Image (tube, grey):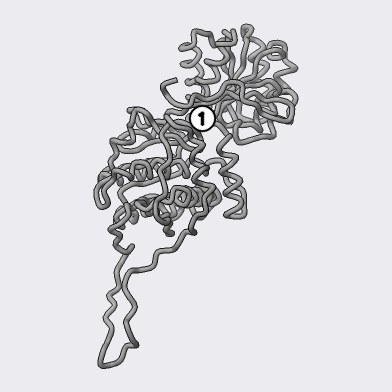
Amino acid sequence: MTETDAGPQAGILPTVKRSARFAFVLGALMVAGCQTIVPRGEPPVGPATPEQPVDRPVEPGLPTDTARNRVALLVPMSGPNAGVGQSIANATTLALLDTKADKVRITTYDTNLGAAAAANRALSEGNRLILGPLMAEDARIIGPIAQKARVPVISFSNDASIAGNGIYSMGYAPAQSIERVVTFAKSKGLNSFAALVPRGTYGERAGTSLLRAVEGAGGTVVSMQPFDRSPGSITAAIKKLDASSRYDAVLIADGGRVAMQAAPVLRKSAKGANAQVLGTELWNTDNAIASTPALRGAWFASVSDGLYGQLATRYRARFGSAPFRLSSLGYDAVLLTVRIARDWRVGTPFPAARLNDAGGFSGIDGAFRFSSTGIAERALEVNQVNSGSIAVVDAAPKGFGE
């Protein structure tokens, strides 16, 4: 378990009605280092003697803090996902330092040692808000525990099914990415759609999202073929697409690596040779897609990388390593918390109703707000894969009034 706080507050980051780039105006300032909190208690004035014994009672848990609101960060700090968890934890530290927040103290708990144990310890130590966990299965364990204590949970999972009953899903939802790129494609005159979807939960949800997005845009889905990520299965799925009606666009509903395998096969097929290739938010984490000729001209929707590039530079300078892309979720969760903390009286429950502010919030990943169901709605941009680079072809809205 680790704790992080920062010095006196110098300012609060803006809402979506102001530019998110102001976050790095604050970040350019000299900031104080984080510190480890030690148990309270003043040292004795002089050396203890047999005639003057010093009674220093042992206090369990964290020391009492009447000046700051306690917030728990629940992420894996050991095990196979420790790198991602540490990256998120480091980003929360950076956000506290950048905002110079003096009303928030964040304590990190390792979910790899047990999600329920981490949640129970966080609650017993007085935390009134939980940021995390990373994994959906942990959120399903932590949610009921936190709900009983009336403590909100802002999870970093992209699994929308966990949202509700006090759990908020802050991850990048594939449904929103698919809807954004389909709407853009339809605006460019593309009407018939096909898809390659991986077998499993993600593929099933991506397929459902495509059907709804195309229906909403007024287009038609002519074929949707599952595959199991092996070269033979991908090729077989593309052959089945060739047996369908002609399509204007085809969604490869998987990560960049799979897209790089599928695209060359697709370009050699009869009906996929000239189709517009579409991708999902997963492509945003793999710049190698720009080195694949068969993917040139492909479109995918994601959060903007503009401010993330600045965060990554500052992260490397402070921590000596590159962050995981999900680190921005930790940073933005702290920006949200700090903003609400302006009106959060220390020692009182977290004002969860503020999470539903209609204007939303802004951060490294752009504008976002939570829907009535607890899912983060994001302002996404559409990117195009070029030769050796990725370019924005339709910018993300600055807010939700656009």
The residue pinned by badge 1 equals 202
Viewport quadrant of the N terminus: bottom left
Whole-percent x, y for residue 378 in the image = 46, 28
Percent of width and height locating residue 155: 41, 40
- Please tell me how crowded label 1 is: few (under 14), some (14-19), or many (20+) other residues with Cα within 10 Å: some
Residue drawn 32% across the image and 54% down it: 68
> What SS does tag 1 mark?
helix
Taking 125 as reference, is 272 above or below it?
Answer: above
Q: Position of residue 73 (x, y in %)?
A: 41, 50
Q: Camera-side residue: 352 or 144? A: 352
Residue sitting at 31 percent across and 36 percent down?
354
160 with respect to 149 (left or right):
right
Residue type at mark 1 is: Tyr
Q: Residue at x 49, y 59 (%)?
A: 33
Foreground: 331 or 310?
Answer: 310
Answer whether residue 246 is visible to the viewer in this image: yes
Name the foreground residue: 180 vs 159: 180
Q: Can I make out residue 252 in this image?
A: no
The spot of residue 376 in percent (x, y) is 41, 31
The quadrant in which the C terminus is found is top left
